[in-house]
Image (tube, rainbow, N blue to C red):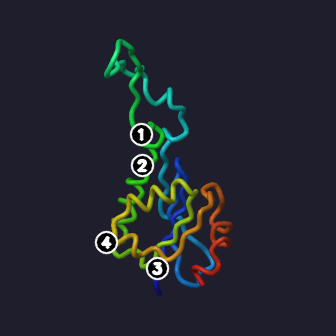
Amino acid sequence: MSKAWVLVANHTHARLFEGEKRAKTLHEIESMVYPEGRMKGRDLITDAPGRSFDSSGEGRHAMSPSTGLRKQGAQKFARDIAHALEKGRVEGRYDKLYIVAEPSMAGTLRMSMSSPTLATIAGESRKNLVTCDSEKIRAELPMWLS
């Protein structure tokens, strides 16, 4: 019987489940947490942004990073999740991958995955079910694992 993994994720928490085709239940095999994702931007950095002179004239302005700290954190968390999925694929622990993630995280995850791991995706849903129990998550996936 083929094994499938179900990833349920948002920007601060990811849960990985294992299920078999036609199985009634999912078994949680890993949970990953990114607590910094819940912090406010001002709490993520303790220093004020630098100041710079205008290219013409005598004005000054604050410099800011091109990507927000929250977005950078979400990208790092997505890379960590993608690494765990890649490792499982290489070890042959699953044949198919199903992703249930909030919309912004789903896109970030896809950009972080390797081509071979992307090829294992058999279904995707853009919902935030991270706090739901495994029965509720399984109930949301009837056609995928049947």
Residue 29 image offset from top left, x and y in percent: 48, 64
Q: Earlier in the sequence, mark 4 or mark 1?
A: 1
Q: Earlier in the sequence, mark 1 or mark 3?
A: 3
Alpha carbon separation for disc pair 2 and 3? 28 Å
Residue 17 image offset from top left, x and y in percent: 52, 67
Q: Are marks 2 and 1 in contact (CB under 8 Å)?
A: yes
Mark 2 burial class by Cα count in 10 Å: few <14, some 14-19, many 20+: some
Q: Earlier in the sequence, mark 2 or mark 4?
A: 2
Q: Indicate which disc residue 67 carries.
A: 1
**Toward the viewer: 26 or 7?**
7
Q: Amino acid at mark 1?
A: Thr
Q: Amino acid at mark 2?
A: Gln
Residue 14 image offset from top left, x and y in percent: 51, 55
Q: Quadrant of residue 111?
A: bottom left
Label 3: which residue? Answer: 3
Alpha carbon separation for disc pair 2 and 1? 10 Å
Residue appearing at x 39%, y 25% in the figure: 63
Residue appearing at x 42%, y 75% in the figure: 120
Q: Are marks 3 and 4 in contact (CB under 8 Å)?
A: no
Label 3 SS: strand
Mark 1 burial class by Cα count in 10 Å: few <14, some 14-19, many 20+: few
Q: Amino acid at mark 3?
A: Lys
Foreground: disc 2 or disc 1: 1
Label 2: which residue? Answer: 75
Mark 3 burial class by Cα count in 10 Å: few <14, some 14-19, many 20+: some
Label 4: which residue? Answer: 90
